[in-house]
Image (tube, rainbow, N blue to C red):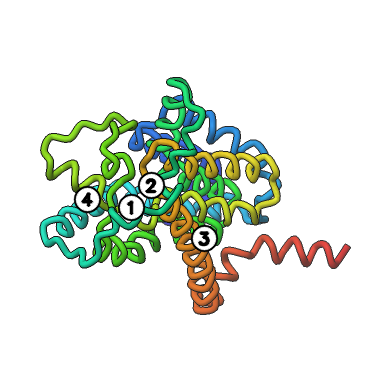
Amino acid sequence: MYIRVKGWLESLDWSHYGIIASIYLIWQIGVGGNWSTACWMLLLICLLGVRQDQVDVEWKRFFIFGLPLLYLFYYFYGSGNDLWWNIANWMFENNRHPWEWDVAMNSIPYNDAAWARAFNTPALDAAMVWVYNYGFVLSLWLCIVRSFWTRSIKKMFSYALSGHIMQFPLILPFYNLIMLREVWYVKGQPDLLGRVFATEGDLTLYVMNCFPSMHTSIAFAMLLVSLREKDRIFKYMMVTYCSLIIISTMYLQIHWVLDVFAGMAFAYGTVKLADLVIRIASNWLPDRLKSYYNSKQKKVYKDTMAA
């Protein structure tokens, strides 16, 4: 009986089932994030040249590690929003902000980024709202999903750690110590995002965490890591999209210019820290695990040498 079951399992095309499961999980990621048609189109463009960055690992071996990891990220980002707002509520209720920077930031010439709206139209406003609203998470998912199809666990960790996983805990001290509200609120202008707040407390909660700009830090981190890829289409797309996310924070009068520069510096430091963590973790991985995952690569190398 055991032999028959084993033979049946070995006869199945696990690569085929793995691809189906992967597509379903990615679809669920998009559904959970309320992705629009434009989001899916952006993902498809990012995947056009994915073969240029694929590593030489068998699909069925990769799926053993890649699918659970992709699901873990999906679970984290699905529950992460509630966790984030619970922390923000706690910070607001305890009012731990020894420094208030509204007046100081508003007094610096050109720091309000009013120049970013020197040219504006309703259509451009709508486009920038779309970029801003999706940019906080979509920029990261584009990179993680693409790195999944490159069959690289290392790349998946590189993008995830450089993004929310490490940035959330590292940025909280700034948000707990510094009270800085969004540009439009400080200057008494309309909210260009068109958000509706039930109470004054809800409004204050949403607009108080500005320094550094996390929209900027997430987008810039994804830009920096994506520049390591070979595929030019993907690199050009991420440079364009991530740059638009950063610009949208100023165009929509959300973040101050210094918030943006601080966010870029914060992103650079987080990427370097993520590289260090991955390098240390790689050295601690058991040799048996490395050997199993890289067995095809070793076989190809031996065959090439024999020829």
Residue at 48% x, 56% y is: 261
CA separation in Å, label 1 and label 3: 25 Å
CA separation in Å, label 3 and label 2: 27 Å
Q: Where residue 152 sits in the image (x, y, percent)? A: 57, 56
Q: Where residue 43 sits in the image (x, y, percent)? A: 53, 35
**Residue kind at label 3, given as amino acid type:** Ser
Locate the C terminus and report the quarter of the image it occupies. Answer: bottom right
Dot 4 corresponds to which residue?
85
Classed neighbour count for the residue bearing mark 3: other residues with Cα under 10 Å, few (<14), some (14–19), many (≥20): many
Which of the marked residues, 2 or 1, is nearer the chain's N terminus?
Answer: 1
**Residue kind at label 4, given as amino acid type:** Trp
Dot 3 corresponds to which residue?
158
Considering only vertical position in the picture, is 73 above or below 142? below
Dot 2 corresponds to which residue?
255
Classed neighbour count for the residue bearing mark 2: other residues with Cα under 10 Å, few (<14), some (14–19), many (≥20): many
Dot 1 corresponds to which residue?
210
Helix, strand or loop at mark 1: loop
Helix, strand or loop at mark 2: loop
Which of the marked residues, 4 or 1, is nearer the chain's N terminus?
Answer: 4
Answer with left or right where residue 31 lies relative to residue 95: right
Q: Where residue 229 sits in the image (x, y, percent)? A: 65, 52
Residue at 56% x, 77% y is: 287
CA separation in Å, label 4 and label 2: 19 Å
